[in-house]
Image (tube, helix red, strand yellow):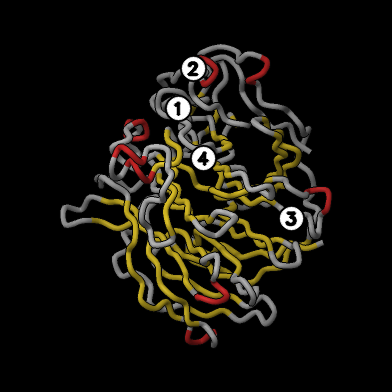
């Protein structure tokens, strides 16, 4: 197994970032209670077998359909496929948005099944789009999925129900992950900062935020900034950069995983109304080499449970049920892009420890759990394979 290199000191060290820029700590060593735990000594041989279920064009998200176990795969350019792991059959899905703005980090993003999907067949999609002035922003749409026959799967009545505001001339950091509260009453969406940084601290925008919505996309009652008007009334937490993972753990606590700048990828325990500090603080630096103040210098901001420097460049993550690997129950399973690895992390309160890193040899974009506790993982880029990981 491998040492998780969490750089806690000194501008003498540098590391490749999510975009291959260089980074290094330049503020000094963190207090002991802010140091990320070290857990593993070298990469571990993967404890699973791999079976390929086909390859895809720049896949971004994978989700397992409730009830059927079929896997839906979004592709950045604006397409989506459905895979039947039992038969190996793959088919396209029609009725997708026609206004996907593809390029850079932008494009077709997440897919999510409504909490009552077995009855309603409601499906949610997210994607980047643009206005008449070519300024880009992310949206979430809702429709119904008709897929009794794989050869004729279609999203019907798709309607945009939420958008990022304002729009900018950018192709970066949309985020756009979707998850639902354990009681099925609310939808949470991760909204990146669109590479503009400062909006993450500005409550008059919904950029750099986690938003809490009703299932129709309207602001949920009881949000911490509800009295400030729209879009502040959507905001659950703020001070985020590019949160590419958003999940509830097995106990019903919400977490995100997000990309830092040049260093400082992090996992955060999300509490209503809390400020997570970006761009005022980070455990990484700007891509041009200028330093950013560290989390431990501003205790008013909610610090990450765990952070990485050099970065892991996370794609997405899940909390594992423990069905097939009981010793992993409740742990985080991360798809690592730059690390080309599957990474396991144990979380306890506001502290996390990397416990294993399994080198896959390809950039890993997303991970999902099958009904039997086996895993699906998908590689990034053109020809990215969908892998079934089993004992």
Q: Find residue 344 and report its horizontal and vertical position in percent.
A: 71, 44
Q: Within the image, what quadrant is residue 12 found in?
A: top right
Q: Find residue 96 and report its horizontal and vertical position in percent.
A: 38, 72
> Mark 1 = which residue?
277
Dot 4: element: strand
**Which tag, 1 or 4, sits closer to the chain's start?**
4
**Disc number for residue 78:** none
Q: Is residue 31 left or right of residue 18?
A: right
**Disc number for residue 321:** 3
Alpha-carbon distance for marks 1 and 2? 8 Å
Alpha-carbon distance for marks 2 and 4? 19 Å
**Which tag, 2 or 4, sits closer to the chain's start?**
4
- Label 4 neighbourhood size at 10 Å, few (<14), some (14-19), many (20+)? many
Q: Within the image, what quadrant is residue 98 found in?
A: bottom left
| Residue contact at pointers 3 and 2, CB within 8 angstroms | no
Alpha-carbon distance for marks 4 and 3? 22 Å
> Mark 4 = which residue?
258
Looking at the image, can residue 275 be seen?
Answer: yes
- Label 1 neighbourhood size at 10 Å, few (<14), some (14-19), many (20+)? many
Q: Is residue 235 left or right of residue 380?
A: left
> Mark 2 = which residue?
298
- Residue drawn at (53%, 30%), measured in percent from left and top? 264
Dot 2: element: loop
**Which tag, 1 or 3, sits closer to the chain's start?**
1
Q: Is residue 272 above or below residue 82?
A: above
Q: Is residue 41 above or below residue 147?
A: above
| Residue contact at pointers 1 and 2, CB within 8 angstroms | yes
> Closer to the observer: label 4 or label 3?
3
Alpha-carbon distance for marks 3 and 2? 35 Å
Q: Quadrant of the N terminus?
A: top right
> Closer to the observer: label 1 or label 4?
1
Alpha-carbon distance for marks 1 and 3? 31 Å
């Amino acid at each position: 197994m491998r040492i998780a290199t969490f750089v806690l000191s000194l501008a003498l060290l540098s590391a490749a970032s999510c975009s291959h820029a260089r980074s290094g700590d330049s503020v000094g060593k963190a207090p002991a209670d802010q140091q990320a735990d070290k857990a593993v000594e070298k990469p571990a041989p993967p404890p699973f077998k791999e079976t390929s279920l086909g390859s895809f064009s720049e896949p971004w998200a994978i989700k397992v359909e409730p009830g059927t176990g079929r896997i839906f795969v979004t592709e950045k350019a604006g397409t989506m496929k459905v895979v039947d792991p039992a038969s190996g059959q793959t088919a396209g899905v029609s009725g997708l948005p026609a206004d996907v703005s593809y390029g850079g980090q932008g494009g077709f993003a997440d897919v999510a099944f409504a909490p009552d999907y077995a009855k309603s067949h409601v499906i949610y999609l997210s994607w980047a789009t643009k206005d008449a002035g070519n300024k880009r922003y992310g949206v979430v749409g809702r429709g119904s999925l008709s897929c009794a026959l794989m050869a004729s799967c279609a999203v019907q009545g798709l309607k945009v129900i939420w958008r990022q505001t304002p729009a900018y001339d950018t192709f970066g950091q949309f985020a756009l992950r979707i998850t639902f509260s354990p009681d099925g009453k609310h939808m949470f969406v991760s909204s990146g900062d669109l590479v503009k940084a400062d909006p993450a601290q500005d409550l008059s925008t919904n950029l750099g935020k986690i938003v809490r919505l009703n299932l129709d996309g309207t602001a949920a009652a009881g949000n911490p900034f509800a009295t400030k008007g729209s879009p502040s009334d959507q905001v659950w937490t703020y001070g985020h950069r590019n949160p590419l993972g958003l999940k509830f753990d097995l106990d019903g606590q919400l977490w995100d995983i997000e990309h830092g700048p040049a260093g400082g990828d992090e996992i955060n325990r999300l509490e209503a109304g809390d400020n997570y500090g970006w761009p005022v603080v980070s455990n990484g630096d700007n891509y041009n080499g200028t330093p950013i103040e560290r989390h431990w210098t501003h205790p008013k901001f909610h610090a990450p449970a765990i952070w990485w420097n050099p970065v892991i460049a996370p794609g997405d993550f899940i909390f594992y049920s423990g069905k097939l690997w009981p010793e992993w129950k409740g742990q985080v399973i991360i798809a690592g892009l730059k690390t080309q690895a599957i990474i396991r992390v144990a979380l306890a309160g506001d502290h996390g420890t990397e416990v294993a890193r399994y080198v896959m040899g390809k950039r890993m974009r997303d991970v999902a759990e099958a009904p039997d506790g086996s895993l699906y993982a998908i590689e990034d880029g053109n020809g990215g394979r969908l892998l079934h990981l089993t004992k």
